[in-house]
Amino acid sequence: MHELALCLGILTTIEKQAEQHGFSQVRTVRLNIGMLAPVASEALRNCFEIASQGTMAAGAVLAIERIPARGWCATCATPVTVQDYFEACPRCGRPELITTGGDELSIAELEVD
Ligand SMILES: [Zn+2]
């Protein structure tokens, strides 16, 4: 998995935000992660705890929200909300959903001091 790379990316973003907004301690990092992103929330939390040691985000809580993906059915063209890659269409039952997005990861909010 690439949780470490993600954590380092998050920390870099936090440092840039800190330069712009002049805070020195992060309490909570709210992340929006697409339901289809290949990221394990627990692994990400553990990784962040280690990667943030010695930074202004040390001891910060990662609050992770999984965002459902949107998509549509290739067979009957019904728009669907996708929770899983292998889901079937709720209308016609065929497992041919085309997803749009759902694998994004972004910082929704930083709670800082
Ligand atoms: Zn369908």
Image (spheres, rainbow, N blue to C red):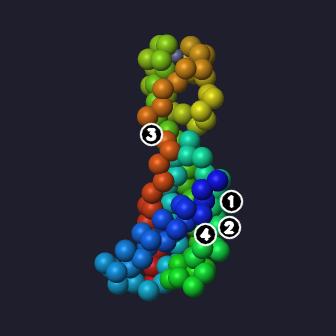
Contact between labelled residues 2 and 4, with CB atoms less than 8 Å apart:
yes
Circle 1 packing at 10 Å, graded few (<14), some (14-19), many (20+), is: few
Point 64% across, 73% down: residue: 49
Q: Classify residue 45 by image quadrant.
A: bottom right
Query: Seen from this angle, which residue lies furthest left?
Result: 20
- Real-space Cα separation, disc 4 to disc 2, in angstroms: 5 Å
Of helix, strand and loop, which one carries label 1? helix
The residue under label 4 is 48
* Residue 63 in view in this figure: no
Circle 4 packing at 10 Å, graded few (<14), some (14-19), many (20+), is: many
The residue under label 3 is 101
Of helix, strand and loop, which one carries label 4? helix
Give the percent coordinates (x, y) of residue 25: 48, 84
Instruction: Tell me if residue 106 comes above or below residue 8 in the rendering.
Output: above
N-term mark: 2 or 3: 2
Q: What residue type is disc 1 on?
A: Glu
**Which of the pair 58/108 is nearer the observer?**
58
Contact between labelled residues 2 and 1, with CB atoms less than 8 Å apart:
yes
Give the percent coordinates (x, y) of residue 48: 60, 69
- Real-space Cα separation, disc 4 to disc 3, in angstroms: 24 Å
Contact between labelled residues 3 and 1, with CB atoms less than 8 Å apart:
no
Point 48% across, 65% down: residue: 9
Circle 2 packing at 10 Å, graded few (<14), some (14-19), many (20+), is: some
Is residue 96 found left or right of 101 in the rendered image? right
Q: Quadrant of the C terminus?
A: bottom left
The residue under label 2 is 46
- Real-space Cα separation, disc 2 to disc 3, in angstroms: 26 Å
Q: What residue type is disc 3 on?
A: Gly
N-term mark: 4 or 3: 4
Q: What residue type is disc 4 on?
A: Phe
- Real-space Cα separation, disc 1 to disc 3, in angstroms: 22 Å
